[in-house]
Amino acid sequence: MNSEASAQDSRSCLRKAKAKIEFRYKDAKTAQKISYLLEIDNRIPYGLAHAIAPKKIKTESRGNRVITHIEHEKLSTLLATIDDLLFCERLIEDLVCWT
């Protein structure tokens, strides 16, 4: 087996780590505000997309809930992203609920 075939075989064994994080709020209006602000935080800054490993993050509101789906090839990156999401959610919730 040549090295190119071996590299293809190892890539086919890769699995993506996935997470679904759900937050619940007192009403749909609060959930919409928080969802919108979290989605802004999820965006990769212009000019950096080529330097960052691809990860999928999608945040949406459904009624009084905010749901974020995260997917990445590296578990460590997924966990760091979850940590960042929880920190940002707490900060945004404090701002939205106290204003």
Image: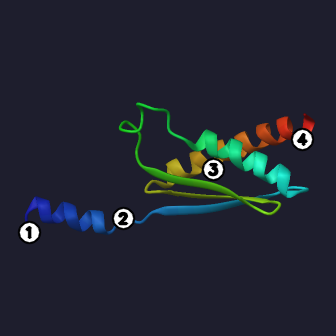
Circle 3 or circle 1, nearest the eye:
3
Q: Which x, y percent locates residue 92? A: 77, 39
Secondary structure of residue under mark 3:
helix
Residue at the disc numbered 3: 82
* The image quarter in which residue 96 lies: top right
Q: Which of label 2 and label 1 is nearer to you? A: 2
| Residue of label 2 | 14
Residue 16 vs residue 95, the one in the foreground: 95
Badge 2 element: loop
How far is disc 4 from disc 2 in space, using C-alphas? 41 Å
**65 and 17: which is toward the camera:** 65
Q: Nearer the viewer, mark 3 or mark 4?
A: 4
Q: Earlier in the sequence, mark 4 or mark 1?
A: 1
Which residue is rendered at x = 49% and y = 33% of the image? 45
User: Which amino acid, by three-letter code, is at mark 1?
Assistant: Met
- Spatial CA distance of label 3 from label 1 is 39 Å
Tell me the kind of residue under disc 4.
Cys
In the rendered image, the quadrant that contains the C terminus is top right
Tell me residue 42's x, y (percent). Answer: 58, 43
Check the image and report above or below for 43 versus 74: above
Secondary structure at badge 4 equals helix
Is 43 situated left or right of 66 in this image? left
Q: Give the labeled residue for mark 1.
A: 1
> How many labels sit on residues?
4
Q: Position of residue 43 (x, y in %)?
A: 54, 41
